[in-house]
Image: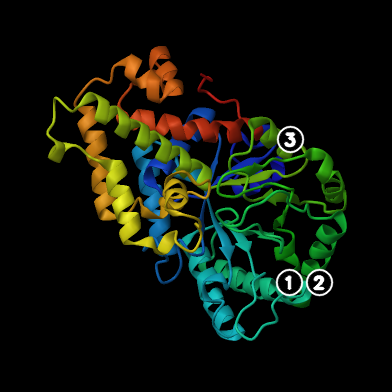
C-alpha cells in the first residue's frame, strides 16, 4: 500500500507509514476545508474525488467542468494553507453513466470526452466504471464487454496524458461490482460479498482487454479493484463490515500483485470496522454522504443554538431560520429526493433531513440555502456561544473548545464536526492524528 500511496501522492514522505488512504467524495467547500485541515495536521496527502455526475465536460450538477473543479479545490487549499502538491485528485465512476439512456456508442463517445477532460485537467486517479447498460444493451453486461469499454476509456486517458506530456501518468481503478453511489434506496438487511472467484475473474478479463489494446504499460498502473466487502447503508440503517464474511475475498489479493481493493459506501462504518477493512486489504476507503451528514448535523445544531440564544437580540427577519429554509426549498424543488424517499408525509419529512443517503447535500449550493447558512454563521460570530449551550447541542465540540483545540467560532465548530468523521478514516489508514479525541 505504501507504494500505491507513493504513486498517488508523488512520493509524499508520509506514504511509507500509511496502511491505506481515504477519499473525500464531496464538492462542499466547508467539507473540503475540514479535510485539508485534518490532512495538514496529520502530515499526510489528501485524496479528493469528484463523481461523473458532479463534474463533467458540460458542468455536471455542480456547474463545474474538471478544470473548474481543480481550480476550486486548489483555491480552498491555498486558503487553508494546505500544499497543492499534497493534493491527489481523482475521478469517480467515470464512464457512460450520465448518458446511459443514449445508444451505447453515443454514450461511450461522450464518456471518452469525459475521460479526456479529467486527465487534461490534472486528475491522476481515474476510476473507470463502464458497468452500466446503455441504450440497446442487454440489461446486464458481460464482464468482457465491461472490460473492453473500460480499456477503451483507458486508451483515451493514456493519449491525453501523452499529449500533455505530464510528468505523472494516471493510475487506474477498475471493477464492476460497484455499490450504488450515495447508498441504497431500498431497505437492506444483508449485502452479498464479492466472491474470491469473481474478483479474480474481473481482474483477468480486464487484463486481457488491456493487452488487446496494447496497454500493458498502463496495466502496471491499475492499482485497485472495486469490490463489495459487505458494507452499505440505506436510509435508516447501516450494514456493518463483518471480516469473517470477506476472508475469501481478502485472500484473493495474494493473486493480484500490485493491487488493493477499493471500498465504496463505507460511510457510517464504526471506527473499528474501518480499521478492519484496511487490515483486510480494502485500502482505499471512499466517504461521501457521511461527511455532508456531519456538516448538516453541525449546521442544524448551530441553528438550534441560534434559536435558543438570539430571540431577544435579533428580530425574526434577521435570524437565519435555516431549517425552515432548507425544508421549503426541498419541497419546492423535489427532484433530488422524491424518487428516493417513500412513505407517508411524516416519514418523508424525517427522511429529507435525517436519511443516511443525505440527499439534502444536493441543496447546499442553492442560493437561498447558502445565504441562510452564511447568515447563521454570521449571526453566531457576533456573539459568544456559552459553553453550557454548546455542550447541549454539540458535546464533542464543547470539549474541543474547553481543551483549546478549536476557537469556538461557528466556522471552527462546523469543521470540527466534519473532522470527527474524517479522523476515523485517517486513523484507520495509519495517520497519527494530531487532534485528540473528545
Assess disc 1: are there few (<14), some (14-19) or many (≥20) residues with their C-alpha within 10 Å of its C-alpha: many
| Residue 149 location (% of width, % of height) | 68, 75
Q: Which residue is mark 3?
A: 276
Relative depth, front residue between 344 and 291: 344
| Residue 356 location (% of width, % of height) | 53, 46
Q: CA distance from mark 1 to mark 3?
A: 30 Å
| Residue 326 location (% of width, % of height) | 32, 49
- Give the residue drawn at x 29%, y 16%: 386
Q: Which residue is mark 2?
A: 208
Relative depth, front residue between 353 and 277: 353
Relative depth, front residue between 286 and 123: 286
The quarter of the displayed image where residue 169 is located: bottom right
Does any portion of residue 169 appear in the rendered image? Answer: no
**In the picture shown, does residue 293 fall above or below 204?**
above
State which tag comes first along the sequence, 2 or 1. 1
In-image side of 122 versus 19 (left or right): left
**Mark in the foreground, 1 or 3:** 3
Q: CA distance from mark 2 to mark 1?
A: 8 Å
Q: Which residue is mark 1?
A: 147
Amino acid at each position: 500500500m505504501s507504494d500505491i500511496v507513493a504513486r498517488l501522492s508523488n512520493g509524499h514522505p508520509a506514504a511509507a507509514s500509511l496502511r491505506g488512504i481515504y477519499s473525500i467524495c464531496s464538492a462542499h467547500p466547508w467539507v473540503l476545508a475540514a479535510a485539508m485541515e485534518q490532512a495538514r495536521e496529520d502530515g499526510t496527502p489528501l485524496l479528493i474525488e469528484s463523481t461523473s455526475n458532479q463534474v463533467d465536460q458540460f458542468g455536471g450538477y455542480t456547474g463545474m467542468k474538471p478544470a473548474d473543479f481543480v481550480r476550486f479545490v486548489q483555491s480552498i487549499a491555498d486558503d487553508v494553507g494546505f500544499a497543492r502538491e499534497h493534493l491527489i485528485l481523482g475521478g469517480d465512476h467515470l464512464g457512460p453513466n450520465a448518458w446511459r439512456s443514449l445508444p451505447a456508442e453515443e454514450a461511450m463517445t461522450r464518456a471518452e470526452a469525459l475521460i479526456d477532460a479529467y486527465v487534461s485537467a490534472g486528475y491522476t486517479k481515474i476510476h473507470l466504471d463502464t458497468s452500466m447498460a446503455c441504450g440497446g444493451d442487454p440489461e446486464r453486461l458481460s464482464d468482457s464487454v465491461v472490460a473492453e469499454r473500460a480499456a477503451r476509456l483507458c486508451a483515451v486517458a493514456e493519449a491525453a496524458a501523452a499529449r500533455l506530456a505530464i510528468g505523472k501518468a494516471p493510475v487506474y481503478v477498475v471493477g464492476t461490482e460497484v455499490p450504488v453511489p450515495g447508498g441504497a434506496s431500498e431497505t437492506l438487511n444483508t449485502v452479498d460479498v464479492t466472491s474470491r472467484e469473481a474478483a479474480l475473474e474481473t481482474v483477468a478479463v480486464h487484463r486481457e482487454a488491456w493487452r488487446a489494446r496494447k496497454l500493458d504499460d498502463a496495466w502496471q498502473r491499475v492499482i485497485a479493484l472495486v469490490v463489495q466487502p459487505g458494507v452499505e447503508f440505506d436510509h435508516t440503517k447501516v450494514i456493518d463490515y463483518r471480516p469473517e464474511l470477506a476472508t475469501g475475498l481478502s485472500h484473493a489479493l495474494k493473486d493480484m500483485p500490485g493491487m488493493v481493493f477499493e471500498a465504496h459506501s463505507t460511510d457510517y462504518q464504526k471506527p473499528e470496522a474501518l480499521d478492519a477493512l484496511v487490515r483486510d486489504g480494502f485500502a482505499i476507503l471512499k466517504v461521501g454522504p457521511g461527511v455532508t451528514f456531519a456538516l448538516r448535523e453541525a449546521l442544524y445544531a448551530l441553528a438550534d443554538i441560534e434559536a435558543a440564544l438570539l430571540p431577544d437580540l435579533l428580530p425574526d427577519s434577521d435570524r437565519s431560520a435555516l431549517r425552515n429554509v432548507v425544508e421549503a426549498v426541498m419541497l419546492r424543488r423535489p427532484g433530488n429526493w422524491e424518487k428516493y424517499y417513500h412513505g407517508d408525509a411524516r416519514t418523508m419529512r424525517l427522511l429529507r433531513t435525517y436519511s443516511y443517503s443525505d440527499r439534502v447535500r444536493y441543496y447546499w449550493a442553492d442560493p437561498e440555502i447558502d445565504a441562510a447558512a452564511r447568515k447563521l454563521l454570521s449571526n453566531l460570530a457576533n456573539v459568544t456561544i456559552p459553553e453550557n449551550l454548546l455542550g447541549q447541542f454539540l458535546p464533542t465540540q464543547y470539549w474541543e473548545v474547553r481543551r483549546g483545540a478549536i476557537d469556538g467560532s461557528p466556522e471552527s465548530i462546523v469543521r470540527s464536526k466534519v473532522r470527527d468523521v474524517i479522523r476515523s478514516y485517517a486513523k484507520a489508514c495509519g495517520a497519527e492524528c494530531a487532534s485528540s479525541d473528545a
